[in-house]
Image: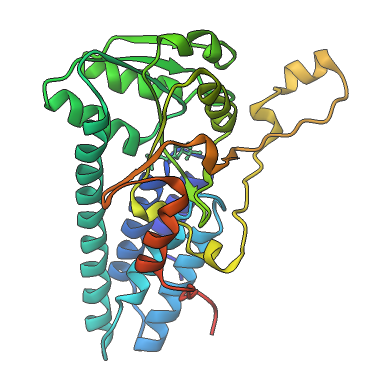
C-alpha cells in the first residue's frame, strides 16, 4: 500500500542518510506527495487511509525533531476534496506550499541572524544545522568576514559537513575535537547552533553536547545563538509533554572491534540533549529573534493550545 518512495525516505531518515531537522521535514513532505501521486486508491476514504499510513511510517523513524510531525501535520491538514483526484491535487499543492514556506523561513531567519554577526567575528559551531548556516551565508552576502571554529561533533562527526559547507563559502575553518571547545571559547564571538525541538519554556533540544558547550560559553561570557525556524517549536510542550530524546545504536560509540578490545561495558548513545533557557541568549526564527523565555508566546500564536494527530488510524 505504501509507495516505494515512502519506504525509502523512512529508511533514509532512520539511518540518517537524510538528516537535520529541516531536511527531514522536507523529505517527509516530498514522501507524502509521492504517496499521493502513486496512489491507486478507488475511494477518497481509501486515499486518506493510505496517506495516514504513509505519515505514520515516516513519523515513527526518529522521535526528537518536531519538524517531522509538524511537516506531516501541515500537509495532512490541507488535504481536502471530494474525489481521489481532488485529494491528490490538494496533497501535491500542500507539499509544494510547505517547501516554499521552509525555504522562505530559512532565508528570513538567515537575514535576522546575520544582523547579530559583525564583520570579523568568529563563530563556534556544533553539529550541522542548515538554519545556523543560513545566518552565516546571509552575513557573508552582507559583505562581512566570518571565521569559524567547528566542533567535530562525536559520535557521527557532522562537524565535517559544516566545515565542508563553510569552506565552499571560503570561510576560514579551524576544526577541533569536542573536548577542546572550552579551550577555544576565548577566541569566539558567538556560539551558533541549530535546534531539533524547542520547548515552551525555551529549552533547546539539539545535538548531544550542545548543553555542555552552552554552559561553558556562559561561563566565558560568549553569547549563545540558536537558529531555529518556527517549525522547530514543539507544540505538545504547551500542554506539559516532554520531548523524547532519541537513543541510537551503541555501535556509533563503540564498534564491535573496539568492544572486543574493551570488554563488557554498557554504552549509552543519546542523540540529543536539553539546554535550559538560562544558557541561551537568543532564539533566531523567521519571525524575529526572541529571548528563549518568551518563545512560548510565539508558540501559542502559531500552534494554539494543542495539536492533532491527523495520521492516527481511524
Ligand atoms: P537544521 C541535527 O540533528 C542537529 O542537531 C542540528 O542542529 C539540527 O538537526 C537542526 O538542523 P541530526 O538530524 O534543521 O543530525 O538546522 O541528528 O538543518
Q: Position of residue 101 (x, y in %)?
A: 23, 56
Furthest residue to the right? 264
> Within the displayed image, which quadrant is ligand 1 positioned in?
top left
The quadrant in which residue 128 appears is: top left
Residue 257 seen from this side: yes
Q: Is residue 141 left or right of residue 303?
A: left
Closer to the camera in the image, 273 or 309? 273
Q: Residue at x 71, y 23 (%)?
A: 254
- Quadrant position of residue 136: top left
Which residue appears at 19% of the width and 38% of the height?
Answer: 111
**Which residue is nearer to you in this view: 238 or 194?**
238
Figure coloring: rainbow
Coordinates of residue 60 in the picture (x, y in percent): 56, 58
**Observer-nearest residue: 201 or 312?**
201
Residue at the spot 37% in from the left edge and 55% down from the top edge: 231
Task: Kindly indicate the quadrant of the structure image that contains residue 188.
Answer: top left
Answer left or right for 117 relative to 22: left
Q: Is residue 82 left or right of residue 43?
A: left
Q: Is residue 219 above or below residue 194?
A: above
Residue furthest toward the bottom?
82
Residue at horizontal 51 percent and vertical 62 percent from the top: 57
Q: Is residue 236 above or below residue 310?
A: above
Amino acid at each position: 500500500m505504501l509507495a516505494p518512495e515512502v519506504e525509502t525516505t523512512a529508511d533514509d531518515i532512520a539511518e540518517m542518510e537524510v538528516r537535520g531537522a529541516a531536511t527531514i521535514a522536507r523529505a517527509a513532505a516530498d514522501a507524502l506527495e509521492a504517496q499521493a501521486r502513486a496512489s491507486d486508491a478507488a475511494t477518497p476514504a481509501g486515499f486518506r487511509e493510505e496517506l495516514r499510513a504513509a505519515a505514520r511510517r515516516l513519523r515513527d523513524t526518529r522521535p526528537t525533531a518536531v519538524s517531522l510531525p509538524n511537516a506531516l501535520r501541515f500537509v495532512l491538514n490541507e488535504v481536502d476534496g471530494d474525489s481521489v483526484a481532488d485529494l491528490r491535487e490538494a496533497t501535491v499543492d500542500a507539499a509544494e506550499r510547505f517547501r516554499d514556506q521552509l525555504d522562505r523561513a530559512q532565508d528570513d531567519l538567515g537575514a535576522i541572524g546575520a544582523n547579530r554577526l559583525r564583520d570579523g567575528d568568529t563563530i563556534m559551531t556544533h553539529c550541522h544545522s542548515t538554519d545556523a548556516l543560513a545566518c552565516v551565508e546571509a552575513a557573508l552576502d552582507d559583505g562581512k568576514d566570518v571565521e569559524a571554529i567547528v566542533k567535530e561533533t562525536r559520535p557521527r562527526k557532522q562537524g565535517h559537513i559544516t566545515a565542508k559547507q563553510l569552506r565552499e563559502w571560503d570561510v576560514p575553518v579551524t576544526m577541533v575535537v569536542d573536548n577542546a571547545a572550552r579551550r577555544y571559547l576565548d577566541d569566539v564571538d558567538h556560539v551558533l547552533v541549530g535546534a531539533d525541538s524547542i520547548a515552551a519554556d525555551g529549552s533547546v533540544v539539539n545535538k548531544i553536547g550542545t548543553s555542555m558547550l552552552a554552559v561553558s560559553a556562559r561561563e566565558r561570557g560568549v553569547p549563545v545563538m540558536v537558529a531555529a525556524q518556527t517549525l522547530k517549536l514543539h507544540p505538545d510542550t504547551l500542554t506539559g509533554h516532554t520531548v523524547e530524546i532519541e537513543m541510537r545504536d551503541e555501535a556509533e560509540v563503540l564498534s564491535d572491534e573496539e568492544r572486543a578490545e574493551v570488554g563488557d561495558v554498557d554504552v549509552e548513545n543519546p542523540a540529543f540533549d536539553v539546554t535550559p533557557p538560562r544558557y541561551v541568549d537568543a532564539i533566531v526564527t523567521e519571525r524575529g529573534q526572541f529571548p528563549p523565555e518568551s518563545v512560548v508566546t510565539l508558540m501559542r500564536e502559531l500552534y494554539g493550545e494543542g495539536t492533532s494527530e491527523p495520521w492516527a488510524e481511524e
